[in-house]
Amino acid sequence: MANLGLSSVVVEVEVDVASRGFPAFNIVGLPSKAIDEAKERVRTALVNSGCDFPQKKITVNLAPADLPKEGSCYDLPVAVGILAASGAIALLDEEIEALYYGELGLDGGLRHTRGGLLVGLLAREVKSDKIYLPILSANEAAVVEGVRVMPVRNLIELIRHLRGEKKIKSLRSIGAEKLIEEAEADFDLSEVAGQEAAKRALTIAAAGGHNLLMSGPPGSGKTMLSRVLPSILPRLSLAESLEVTKIYSVAGLLSPGESMLRRRPFRSPHHSTSLAGLIGGGSRPLPGEVSLAHLGVLFLDEMAEFPRSVLEALRQPMEDGKVVISRSAGRVEYPADFMLVGAVNPCPCGFLGHPTRECKCSQRQIRRYQQRISGPILDRIDLHVSVPAVGVDKFGTEAKGETSSEVREMVEKARNRQEERFAGRKLFMNSQMKNKEVREFCPLDSETERLLRLAVEKYDLSARAYFRLKKVARTIADLFGNEQIKLSDMAEALQYRERVF
């Protein structure tokens, strides 16, 4: 199997063991360095598994020959092909049509190999009867219904199975929906003391999928608030979980034995992250942090410390919900529909406007610091909220606010209203609306429209900000269960548009 981003293509492994010619072992079909090195891994694994390696001319062809092949996943099919071509095993028709995938160790054991879920999805697509995978990667494919997954520990076990001596038991299908229902968040909203305005902004952001920027001094709870956000987002559906797991499977970020992602992803890259690390790339383009945060949260702590070029690269995925990486070898597309949550200090020292601590930054330093995030990026952030310092009187008190489950119930009701509204369209939340949909689904009465226009003129807001304000007001109305956007909904949306950085 060859991966092209999140798409997969069946690769046929043809093996010829010639009776004439000098002993040799060649692999053709545009193999990468890792595949070329498979010759030594396969040879040693077969010998250490008690098999005779044929001292003949061996030619392995990976078809289609014009498609570049990469990775170590071809070790297992090459080994099985050599065994079959040399007469060591006799493959039945059903075994010939099966998919084989996995990296071999020198002792003949099968190692955890990334991309197991994609193998299962490909098998279902091409209607293959069964797939053979390393036992540590088999759970990924077992979440795909209608596919027989054969978990293999080592070559000896597989050879005995193919000879009919001792059969390998197929893996039972994993109840993916139950796993998702049982997933619990690491943090709860009730653990956050105070910060009611910020909690309200989090609720609106979760309900409509809006981007959020929090500004406040060190220790005010910005990071804690951001980590709470996934707990109030709707639970992943099975289709969403598979979509996100595919990205992690391709990137090799699923732990051995792990089947799928059960919670919405939360990614928090360091501000030293490179452009390729954030957006994705490399000679073999792999997904970056924006794709790993797909259908979840991308949290940029100390957002002003990120290089400007890295932040500017966020423009396309924030607008389009996807990343396109072009290389000379081809073009790869990864989904990147995430919620951006940024946290910044108000100034370099962090204490501008602090009630008890003095800011020691000059006006020039403050101005330069606040200009590190460009206007176009700030314009794409729907909610701007100030997170003030928490008073010492709240340090020892037990938080008594709403729990994450209570707020998530509100958010899910608002999302359900949006799904009903967008039925038949490729939209499922308010933040995804384009200008055409905003005009259709966000009508305003004359008084509310007058307020919005006055705000746009007074604060010199852009056309993008005008439409984004309507989206936020629509989400606030959905939280209240209002069919029509009211004046109070727009007034609340406007207060989150006031720049805090």
Image (cartoon, helix red, strand yellow):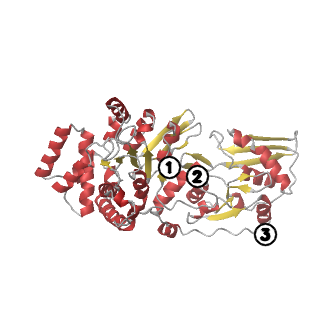
Picture residue at 33% right of the left edge, 36% below the top? 376
Q: Quadrant of residue 370?
A: top left
Q: Is residue 109 left or right of residue 131?
A: right
Residue nearer the viewer, 387 or 173: 387
Is residue 384 placed above or below 172 in the rendered structure?
above
Q: CA distance from mark 3 to mark 1?
A: 41 Å
Report if residue 223 is visible in the image. yes
User: Tag on residue 166?
Assistant: 3
Identify the mark nearer the N-term, 3 or 2: 3
Contact flag, marks 2 and 1 (Cβ < 8 Å) = yes
Mark 3 lies on a secondary structure that is loop
Residue 277: percent from left, percent from top: 53, 41
Amino acid at the residue labelled 3 = Lys
Which residue bears the numbered disc 2?
Answer: 253
Amino acid at the residue labelled 1 = Leu
Identify the mark nearer the N-term, 2 or 1: 2
User: Tag on residue 360?
Assistant: none
Q: Residues within 10 Å of mark 3 (few under 14, many from 20)?
A: few
Q: Is residue 97 left or right of residue 227?
A: right
Is residue 213 placed above or below 144 in the rendered structure?
above
Mark 2 lies on a secondary structure that is loop
Contact flag, marks 3 and 2 (Cβ < 8 Å) = no
